[in-house]
Image (cartoon, rainbow, N blue to C red):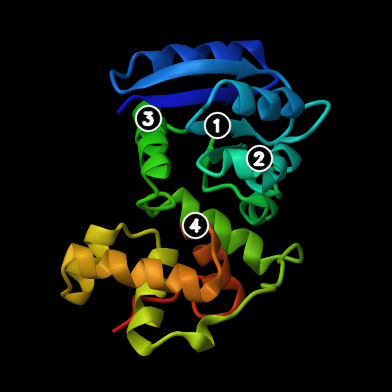
Amino acid sequence: MTIRVLLADDQNLVRAAFALLVASAPDMEVVGEAGTGREAVELARTERADLVVMDVRMPDLDGIEATRLIAADEDLAGVKVLVLTTYDTDENVVEALHAGASGFLVKDTKPAELLDAIRTVTAGDALLSPGPTARLIERFLRGPSSLHPSGPGPDCLSDRERQVLTLVARGLTNTEIADTLGLSPLTAKTHVSRIMGKLEARDRAQLVIVAYESGLVTPGAGQPQ
């Protein structure tokens, strides 16, 4: 399957570089480029994109509001959003995930990692691998901008499901969760699906937010036993 990618960034040079990179992948194609958040929403609707690589800071409509509009549009239910952040200055990552983004990257990420992230988020297998994802979420949820979960919390989960949720929050894939807990990959995937249903989460990104905001996972904590 060819992944249809829409690129949204207000810097022409950045978009051009991303476009060349994405076009170099045999399993991807660029279906559109947007210079504003509003353009990104419109192109997501007209170009049938599978994934939008979305910059946060754009004119007209920023990336967070554009993500919110895409996530709220029933006709775009299958569209994933991968948000870009500058890491040190962007304090909107948690808000972007709450708006419906399925993951995020730092802008100085390696080219191969961007392609891998596009594949990962499109497949819905995991938020992103451990590293920048976990560190960023931990940093922002420690700070004063932390948001509070509005849906059910981990108390409604079984002990095993809480273990699985903790590993999801650490950035592990279904296969890695299965290896860690001695489960089959199918069983791990089933646990994740049930957890999403119980917590009313649209994707794994929201599971991560619930895990950190509820205190199930805390910065620097080890893996569950």
Residue 211 rendering spot, x and y as whole percentages: 52, 73
Q: Residue at x 55, y 31 (%)?
A: 53
Which numbered disc flags the more N-terminal residue, 2 or 4?
2
Numbered badge on residue 74: none
Q: Is residue 96 above or below residue 188?
A: above
User: Is 180 in front, or is 175?
Assistant: 175
Between the residue at mark 1 and the residue at mark 3, the CA separation in whole angstroms equals: 13 Å
Q: Quadrant of the C terminus?
A: bottom left
Looking at the rendered structure, the kind of residue marked 1 is: Val
Between the residue at mark 1 and the residue at mark 4, the CA separation in whole angstroms equals: 16 Å
Which numbered disc flags the more N-terminal residue, 4 or 3?
3
Numbered badge on residue 52: 1
In front: label 1 or label 3:
1
Which numbered disc flags the more N-terminal residue, 1 or 4?
1
Q: Contact, CB < 8 Å: mark 3 with mark 2? A: no
Q: Quadrant of the N terminus?
A: top left
Looking at the rendered structure, the kind of residue marked 4 is: Asp
Q: Contact, CB < 8 Å: mark 1 with mark 3? A: no
Between the residue at mark 3 and the residue at mark 2, the CA separation in whole angstroms equals: 22 Å
Residue 142 rendering spot, x and y as whole percentages: 65, 68
In front: label 4 or label 3:
4
Secondary structure under badge 2?
A: helix
Between the residue at mark 2 and the residue at mark 1, the CA separation in whole angstroms equals: 10 Å
Looking at the rendered structure, the kind of residue marked 2 is: Ile
Q: Residue at x 53, y 38 (%)?
A: 79
Which numbered disc flags the more N-terminal residue, 3 or 2?
2
